């Protein structure tokens, strides 16, 4: 499912126009993005938690030449599914 399809499903279930549902979806995604970008966890009970994780600097290998190279430390986003999502997938 892509974003327009998700917006259409929200519109149908919430009795909204597709444009309004798209706006609501955009606001939700913007708020999750800005909160995680600020370093905060976002927990949606039953769905899951978005967190920021630190990756340490490490030595990698250039796949073309085989030469070692330094990969700098970075931040990444992780998602841990909640019980409700896990249960729904198992059915």
Image (tube, rainbow, N blue to C red):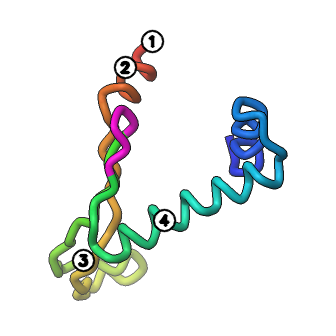
Span highlighted in magenta in the image: 43-47
Secondary structure beneath disc 3?
strand
Q: CA distance from mark 2 to mark 4?
A: 26 Å
Q: CA distance from mark 3 to mark 1?
A: 40 Å
Q: Is residue 85 within the magenta segment?
A: no
Q: Main secondary structure of the magenta part?
A: loop
In this view, the residue in front, 54 or 16, is: 16
Q: Which residue is mark 2?
A: 87
Identify the residue at image location x=26%, y=83%: 71
Q: Which residue is mark 1?
A: 91
Q: Is residue 32 left or right of residue 24?
A: left
Which quadrant would residue 60 be assigned to in this image?
Answer: bottom left
Image location of residue 34, percent across then percent down: 44, 72
Image location of residue 69, percent across then percent down: 25, 87
Q: Which residue is mark 4?
A: 31
Mark toward the start of the polypeptide (3 vs 4) = 4
Mark toward the start of the polypeptide (3 vs 1) = 3
Looking at the image, is mark 3 or mark 1 nearer the viewer?
A: 1
Q: Is residue 75 left or right of residue 13?
A: left
Which mark is drawn over residue 65? none
Q: CA distance from mark 1 to mark 2?
A: 7 Å
Q: Which residue is mark 3?
A: 60
Looking at the image, is mark 2 or mark 3 nearer the viewer?
A: 2
């Amino acid at each position: 499912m892509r974003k327009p399809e998700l917006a259409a499903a929200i519109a149908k279930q919430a009795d909204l126009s597709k444009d309004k549902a798209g706006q609501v979806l955009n606001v939700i995604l913007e708020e999750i993005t800005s909160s995680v970008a600020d370093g905060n966890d976002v927990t949606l009970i039953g769905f899951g938690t978005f967190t920021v994780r630190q990756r340490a600097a490490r030595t990698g290998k250039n796949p073309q030449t085989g030469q070692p190279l330094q990969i700098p430390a970075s931040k990444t986003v992780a998602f841990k599914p909640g019980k409700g999502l896990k249960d729904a997938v198992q059915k």
